[in-house]
Amino acid sequence: MNAMTYKGYSGRVDYDDDDEIFFGRIAGIRDGVSFHSETVAGLKAAFHEAVDDYVETCAKIGKSPQKPYSGNLMLRVDPSVHSKVALAAEVAGKSLNQWGEEVLREAADKQIA
């Protein structure tokens, strides 16, 4: 799996070897918006078109387009994990939010790469 971004939206991309086609959907929103192409360049253009069409269609029907993620994250973990995370942040000289954002960003970058 790979991802692409455009105008704040991300696209989740896969490849179907049987049909020899790239396909994807806008990630992080509940509305189902998909796109596809046989080439990487075409896929990028199809993704941009899908995002633009989504925003334009929402405007036409008077609906606010869903925005991908607000930046607020509610996370429930075992109390022992919470304790370790708080300690790790303190030892690093960072707030829990700063430490968590750094660790989550590194893990996400590694997963997406």
Image (cartoon, grey):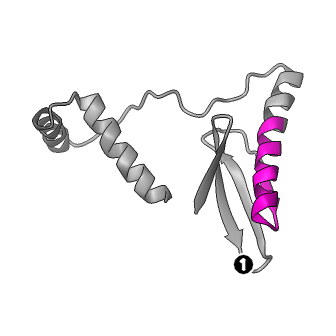
> Residue at the right extreme?
60
Which three-letter amino acid code belongs to the residue tagged 1? Asp
Give the residue drawn at x 15%, y 37%. Answer: 92
Q: Main secondary structure of the magenta part?
A: helix
State which region is magenta: 35-52
> Residue at the top extreme?
62
The residue to which callout 1 is attached is 17
Q: Is residue 12 left or right of residue 102?
A: right
Q: Position of residue 35 (x, y in %)?
A: 79, 53
- The mark tally for this picture is 1
Q: Position of residue 65 (x, y in %)?
A: 73, 27
Q: Quadrant of the N terminus?
A: bottom right
Say which quarter of the image contains residue 3. bottom right
Say which quarter of the image contains residue 20. bottom right
Give the residue drawn at x 75%, y 53%. Answer: 44
Give the residue drawn at x 69%, y 69%. Answer: 15
Q: Position of residue 60 (x, y in %)?
A: 89, 23
Q: Is residue 78 left or right of residue 39?
A: left
Q: Is residue 110 magenta?
A: no
Q: Is residue 46 magenta?
A: yes
Give the residue drawn at x 13%, y 32%. Answer: 90
Residue 46 or 80: which is nearer the viewer?
A: 46
Say which quarter of the image contains residue 77. top left
CA neighbours of label 1 inside 10 A, class few (<14), some (14 to 19), many (20+): few
